[in-house]
Image (tube, rainbow, N blue to C red):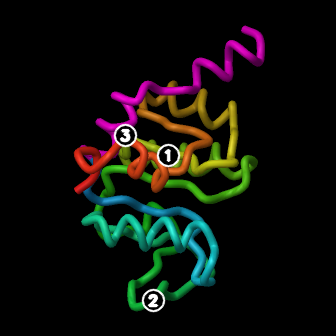
Amino acid sequence: MTSEQESLSMVPSDETIATLIRESKTIAVVGISDKLGRPSLTVSSYLQDHGYSVLPVNPVLESVGHVKCHPSLEALPETPDMVVVFRKPADVPGVVREAANRGIRRIWIQEGIRSPEGYRLAEEHQMQIVMDRCIMKEIMRLGRGTGH
């Protein structure tokens, strides 16, 4: 498969994206920051403001705002419907493995982050995956029926 073919196979349909977003009520955000202006904080706040329950995951933070932060997906008090990843590409395969081990079936790799290995691992574990897209922008683009 050429890199162009591989790239095209990683682009889900609008219907797939809308279903993923609509069916996810609880979202773990891996790599969340507590710094204003960071995309992970902006997107997490947007998700919360639109009715999603957000579970922050970052091993170096105690909390984000007034919400307890968890060191890993394994440490979460509940299994989220989806994981949104704000980590560098080299970290994505490990996050995918951790999500698969936790029984999470949906993973969203945020805009600007591409990991063909992470994508292949997600497919091997029969996970639904979106890569290199901003979940906030997709909710805005696809309209109100997508979110909560």
Give the left or right position of residue 140, taking residue 32 as reference.
left
Q: Quadrant of the C terminus?
A: bottom left
Q: Tags 3 and 1 in contact by the CB under 8 Å rule? A: no
The crowding category of the residue bearing disc 3, from other C-alpha atoms within 10 Å (few below 14, some 14 to 19, many at least 20), is some
What main secondary structure does the magenta stretch of the protein show?
helix
Callout 3 amino acid: Arg
In depth, the one of 72 and 109 nearer the eye is 109
User: Element type at marker 2?
Assistant: loop
Give the left or right position of residue 114, taking residue 121 as reference.
right
**Position of residue 146 measured from the top left corner of the image (x, y, whole percent):** 28, 45
Numbered mark located on residue 127 in the image: none
**Position of residue 43 measured from the top left corner of the image (x, y, whole percent):** 49, 65
Residue lying furthest bottom: 66
In the rendered image, residue 136 lying in the magenta stretch gets the answer no
Q: Tags 3 and 2 in contact by the CB under 8 Å rule? A: no
Callout 2 amino acid: Gly
Give the left or right position of residue 60, taking residue 101 as reference.
right
The crowding category of the residue bearing disc 1, from other C-alpha atoms within 10 Å (few below 14, some 14 to 19, many at least 20), is many
Which quadrant holds residue 67?
Answer: bottom left
Residue appearing at x 58%, y 18% in the figure: 9
Residue underneath mark 3: 105
User: Element type at marker 1?
Assistant: strand
| Mark whose residue sits in front, 3 or 1 | 1
Residue underneath mark 1: 108
**Position of residue 60 measured from the top left corner of the image (x, y, whole percent):** 62, 81
Q: Which residues are magenta?
A: 1-23
Residue appearing at x 46%, y 79% in the figure: 69
